[in-house]
Amino acid sequence: MRSPPGIAAVSDVHSPLYLEAYKRSLELTGLSKVDIVIFAGDMVERNMINALAPAEEATRKAFPGAEIVAVFGNDEFMEHEDEYRKQYPSIKWLDDELYNVEIRGYKLGIIGSRGAIDRPTYWQARYIPNIWEIYEERVEKIKSFLEDSTKENDITLLVTHYGSASCTLIGEPRKGWPGIYSRKVEELLKTYKPNAAIHGHAHKGRGYCKVSGVPVYNVAFPVNRRVVKIGYTISLLGFH
């Protein structure tokens, strides 16, 4: 049987905040056969764009030949997205997009988005007048991409910065959950059943759970203190 694509993921390094710890963890990672490394947002602290360079360099040294695919987090500010793309052109940036790629004979679809939350933060509600509409549109785009990718690809991964399941939030204060994840996105996992869902943002949550059989990974560095190898089930009759 063909070896499936090797996927690893991390988020919330908040470089330079956890940069040195991240670099040390990469020296001890022990992961092999990694084809794609996913940055699930907040790789820098408060839009410190230049701080991504040493994190990218360390990642490429640890995983030579692997492609880096990234989504933006809330600390990569929306109005500066083009600066990230310009300064880091070797990273595949996904912003409400479906990226289709073939690896080792498998068709892989990566859906990348900041994601959504059930309740905008006070700052968002005050300074982004259409924030509710933005989140609704993102959920609809994710739904559309899931419909397409699960039909067309052998493997579908949903990558968001904000949480995509409540079970990975355990450890976070319950009253804060609406500002961390989206119930609507979680319902999409139950309906479309991608091979895995990957998110960050929940610094005090759990690293792993399942939603209707779908593996969900919270890859926030403060939770795992390492890059996480992403697992998914392969069926002889297909992936879904």
Image (cartoon, grey):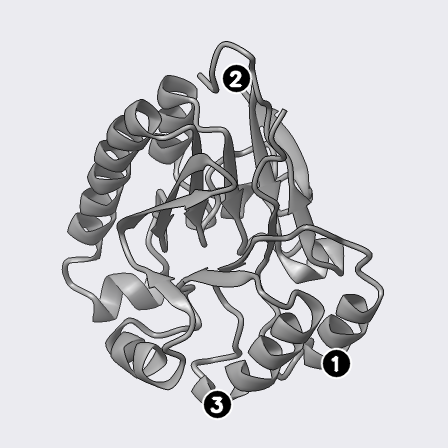
Which residue occupies 68% across, 46% down? Answer: 229
Query: Looking at the picture, how far across and down is residue 193, in whole percent?
Result: 43, 22
In the picture, residue 58 is in which quadrant? bottom right
Which amino acid lies under the numbered mark 1 shown in the image of this protein? Glu
Residue 71 versus residue 168 in the image, above or below: below
Residue 107 versus residue 50 in the image, above or below: above
Quadrant, the C terminus: top left
Residues under numbered marks 2 and 1 in contact, where contact means CB atoms less than 8 Å apart: no
Secondary-structure class at tag 1: helix
Question: With 28 as the anchor, is 64 left or right in this view?
Answer: left
Would you call the spot at circle 1 few (<14 residues within 10 Å), some (14-19), or many (20 or more)?
A: some
Which amino acid lies under the numbered mark 3 shown in the image of this protein? Asn
The mark closer to the camera, 2 or 3, is 3
Disc 2 versus disc 3: distance between alpha carbons? Answer: 40 Å
- The answer to which of marks 2 and 1 sits earlier in the sequence is 1
Secondary-structure class at tag 2: loop
Would you call the spot at circle 2 few (<14 residues within 10 Å), some (14-19), or many (20 or more)?
A: few
Which residue occupies 21% across, 43% down? Answer: 136
Give residue 50's mark.
3
Give residue 111's mark.
none
Secondary-structure class at tag 3: helix
Numbered-mark total: 3
Q: Which residue is mark 2?
A: 212
Give residue 20's mark.
1
Residue 205 at least partly seen: no
